[in-house]
Amino acid sequence: MAFHPQLKYDAPRSEINMIPLIDVMLVLLIIFIIAAPLLTHAVKIDLPAADSVAVSMKPETIQLGIKADGQFLWNGESVEEARLETLMREAAGRTPLPELHLQVDATAPYEFVARTMARASRAGLEKIGFVSKPEEQTQ
């Protein structure tokens, strides 16, 4: 009977075997190196040359003010609530589509703002922004 001598290293190792991880990473690297040129293919087309100037049409801005008592101001002019929707529909028919800038009184109820935004959306005005005063910095 032959006995094999016991080695001192029979205890389990507590380190990670990095070789399989490195092999997987190298395979993935090779796959990406091969696949990257295939993803960036482009069709080359000879486009005709023309002498023209780019047209830059800036959209008109409409200032709509809402006071605390529910009064509306269309570009600074007082407007009745019934006429407001017709003005919005007329503005939505323009090209390019104008931007609606809401200037709301700080004490105005949210209900006025929500109804006005809903009217503008129904009329077709898609670009709506809020105008506010910048805060004064105290130093």
Image (cartoon, rainbow, N blue to C red):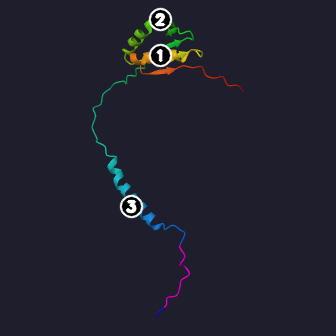
Helix or strand or loop: what does disc 2 sit on?
loop
Do the residues bearing badges 2 and 1 touch, measured as CB atoms within 8 Å? no
Residue stretch rendered in magenta on the structure: 3-12
Q: Is residue 137 left or right of residue 20?
A: right
Do the residues bearing badges 2 and 3 touch, measured as CB atoms within 8 Å? no
Q: Residue at x 43, y 6 (%)?
A: 83
Q: Is residue 12 left or right of residue 49?
A: right
| Amino acid type, mark 3 | Val
Residue for badge 1: 115
Q: Residue 113 location in percent, x, y?
A: 51, 17
Q: CA distance from mark 2 to mark 1?
A: 14 Å
Position above or below: 77 against 49: above
Q: Which mark is residue 80?
A: 2
Q: Residue 96 location in percent, x, y?
A: 38, 19
| Amino acid type, mark 1 | Arg
Q: Nearer the viewer, mark 2 or mark 3?
A: 2
Task: Give residue 43's quadrant in the image.
Answer: top left
34 or 64, nearer to the observer: 64
Residue for badge 3: 27
Q: Which mark is residue 129?
A: none
Position above or below: 66 against 46: above
Q: CA distance from mark 1 to mark 3?
A: 60 Å
Q: Residue at x 37, y 17 (%)?
A: 95
Helix or strand or loop: what does disc 1 sit on?
helix
| Among numbered discs 1 and 3, the one appearing first in the sequence | 3
